[in-house]
Amino acid sequence: MNKQWTDTFREEIAHFRGTIDAFDEGELDRKAYKGTSGGLGSYAQRDPSRHMLRLRMPGGRLTMERLEFLAETVEREKVGRLKLTTCETIQLHDLSAGQVPDIITRAIDSAILTKGGGGDNPRNVMASPLSGVQPGEAFDVMPYAEAVTEYLLSICRDIKMPRKLKIAFCNGADDSVHSAFRDMGFLANGDGTFALRVAGGLGAARPSMGVLVDEAVAPREVLYYVRAMVDTFCAHGNYENRAKARTRYMQDTLGPDGLKEAFLKNVAARKAEGGLDLTGLESPANIARDNSGTVDHPRAILQKQPGLYAVKYHPIGGLLPVEKPRQLYELLKDIPGAEVRIAPNEALYMINLTAAEAEKVIAATADGAQTEFEHSVACIGAATCQQGVRDSQSVLRTVVKAVREAGLPDGALPKLCISGCPSSCAAHQAGAIGFQGGVKLVDKKPEPAFKLTLGGSDQLGEARFGEGGAVILEKNMPALLVELGKAAAAAGQRWEQWSRDHAQERDAIIARYS
């Protein structure tokens, strides 16, 4: 990002110091403060004296420079909690008002910009986490995610959208970034173009698959499409009703065909204007290493570069141990081409490793999830988030403990997606088993509960939203999941097969708990 832009950002941060101090001293209410802080990637937690800061990582790239900054910040500021997010960012939690602007400022020098990390802004642009190294991908989409990030940050002060805009790039092999139902989802085709869907999204009301508007977007023209989406949203988005101020509601107001027509008209207008062609974007050159070794481990993934590996690490609940950034940095800093990628499922991938290097990383990350079920995704939860309804992190810890004690085999249960409220931060509608935090009346008294959905998927070409609606008391969730897992294990089947073959038995078990 150019110096003029970062200088302007520094001026914003200087102004923000006064705002966060005013909030800390009780001179500004939550709503007014959130309207300013969100645009810089920070929110007050449920305890208003504590703050969260979201570090924007385009495409989920945690380079060595950024990883070193993270390690040093955790140590210097004594950060108590780190959270990996489903939008491929990292959240620092439990910060004081004085720490937030200082960290935002220092982050700039490590190529980390928090601008647009929240609020009514274009959010972190996502990319398939193994883009550039994944076998079977159409092509490396990371350069486009980064170019779009830079462009959006350059224009975000000049536009006022109804609400946030989420953009994702899928490499054609892994759609964990949900290109099928983002505000904009670019899917890499084998012929070197992108298929584009727009106006998709999750949420308590009207979860929507995106509308296919173009099947062969030329990569060099991506920015024309991005700007056209901003234009379309600003022209047709709902500025009056915040609950309906997301792109997916344009499918109602314009109809899918009308939306496609309006969008493509804006694309044509921007192309006629010109000036947004992308040129000179290249993927990194292949790394020349001694790649003769091999490693056999379930968390080691063979890259498309011969002899190189990626290692997956999923801390339970996406809560990254605060000592881990330093450990990973010391392990990776001298390895040519090594970097960390943040995945939408709250995991990390360490890439471009030889077999010997991969073995060391595997050993250093042995504290993470060991089974498919333990790879479950959960938002930060109501104990921290002011918008939260249920403490999803506490629920996840409880059910993981119960499943471990039950001794269920790996695969008897799928990973869960647990959102603590209707905001879908854990993408529960796209989970094989999803839970949405809420309440249930028992003897006319509200009890902590979760709405259950089944059968969602974010697999490439198979994207769908879960169905169901049974409401389960929070206290009954461990027993329900253990019984479901035992039934699948007794049949000798993994969850997906058992759930299809024994739907009646599955539903009868759920009914007993709802």
Image: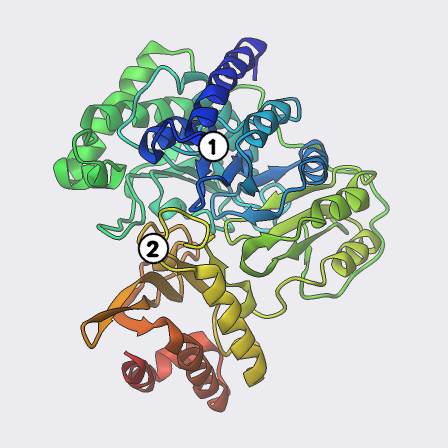
Question: Residue placed at 34% from the left, 56% from the top?
Answer: 389
What amino acid type is highlighted by mark number 1?
Gly
Q: Which residue is mark 2?
A: 421
Q: Secondary structure at mark 1?
A: loop
* Residue closest to the far bottom: 490
**Residue 143, image x, y percentages:** 56, 30
Q: Nearer the viewer, residue 311 or 48?
A: 48
Where is 154 relative to 497, above or below? above
For the C terminus, the image quarter is bottom left
Q: Nearer the viewer, residue 402 or 166?
A: 402
For the N terminus, the image quarter is top right
- Residue 496 is marked as none
Q: Is 483 left, or right, of 306 in this rendering?
A: left
Can you tell which quarter of the image residue 404 is in?
Answer: bottom right
**Residue 442, image x, y percentages:** 23, 75
Identify the image's colour scheme: rainbow, by chain, secondary structure or one colour: rainbow
Dot 1: within a 10 Å radius of its alpha carbon, few (fewer than 14), some, or many (20 or more) residues? many
Q: Answer yes or no: is residue 92 visible.
A: no
Q: Nearer the viewer, residue 110 or 275?
A: 110
Q: Nearer the viewer, residue 251 or 94?
A: 94
- Label 2–label 1 contact, CB within 8 A: no
Question: Residue placed at 15% from the left, 34% from the top?
Answer: 258
Q: Which residue is mark 1?
A: 41
Question: Residue placed at 43% from the left, 57% from the top?
Answer: 459
Q: Is 488 left, or right, of 324 in this rendering?
A: left
What amino acid type is highlighted by mark number 2?
Cys
Label 2 or label 1, whichever comes before in sequence order: 1
**Residue 511, image x, y percentages:** 27, 82
Q: Is 337 left, or right, of 463 in this rendering?
A: right
Q: CA distance from mark 2 to mark 1?
A: 20 Å
